[in-house]
Image (cartoon, rainbow, N blue to C red):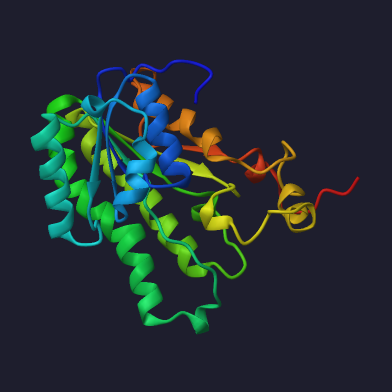
Amino acid sequence: MTHNSYAVSGKVVLVTGGGSGIGRAITRAFLDNGATVAVVGRRAEALEETLAGYDDDRALAVQGDLSTAAGVREVVETVVGKLGRLDVLVNNAATYSAQDITELSDEEWDGFRSTNIDAFVHLARAVLPELEKTGGNVVVTGSVSGMRGDWGQAAYNATKAAVMNLVQSLALDWGGRGVRLNSVAPAFTLTDATAGVGRDEESLAPFVNRIALGRPGTPEDIAPAVLFLASDDAAYVTGATLTVDGGTTASTGQPHVE
């Protein structure tokens, strides 16, 4: 899963949204590097698929709803109760769709807010005191969409911007207590969420045009960056956003014309 090894062996890690895509790759990368991982999601079968083949002593699937404070408390209490402590939170769960703001329904906005923002707020309140005990840290899967605007994605981009700013603010508040918080910012990545685009050369071309490395990202591209930020090698890194975007944000936005 990773080309190098990362200093996470023996750490207890909680990964949200680990049933597929980037969350699944992050979970497996931590396990491959010796960590104990509790993976959280709404679909038990998907979580079990993520953990298939790993030692039950180091892998825990927790089905839960993180959109409510009560649901988060139950998940955190289960993880800490069964695994004894918590060293790392990877806040990865998110929802995505595209629409004009005039077509955004109340239900869709509630879904964006509860999954992308509220869940992290609930998790931060429940987890930060646990991380203070262990000198732990948080890594959030943000997005370059939280750094810039996109056509047809105003609601999604707003929620990503909010959670990435929360990371910076909490890094200030908790740094003196020994807790670090950082985020990674992928660009277009081949996952289930992007299954409707980029599956053939023609539909992929507009995305590749903006990517310096000439290919879309994969979940396996994102996972090592998360492991680095969670490891002791990043002990003096907090409040940072690491773009893992193939050079997407290096561009001014003009098309690549040869």
Q: Closest to the observer: 50 or 119?
A: 50
Q: Closest to the observer: 242 or 216?
A: 216
Q: Is residue 100 left or right of residue 10?
A: right
Q: Residue at x 64, y 38 (%)?
A: 246
Q: Is residue 214 left or right of residue 131?
A: right
Above or below residue 105? Residue 202 is above
Residue 173 percent location from the top left of the image? 23, 41
Residue 56 percent location from the top left of the image? 24, 29
Q: Residue at x 15, y 46 (%)?
A: 126
Q: Is residue 20 left or right of residue 245?
A: left
| Res 217 quadrant in image | top right
Is residue 48 visible in this depiction of the protein?
Answer: yes
Residue 136 percent location from the top left of the image? 23, 28
Above or below residue 228? Residue 148 is below
| Res 25 quadrant in image | top left
Q: Residue at x 40, y 75 (%)?
A: 108
| Res 236 quadrant in image | top left
Residue 153 percent location from the top left of the image? 54, 67
Q: Quadrant of the C terminus?
A: top right
Is residue 17 visible in this depiction of the protein?
Answer: no
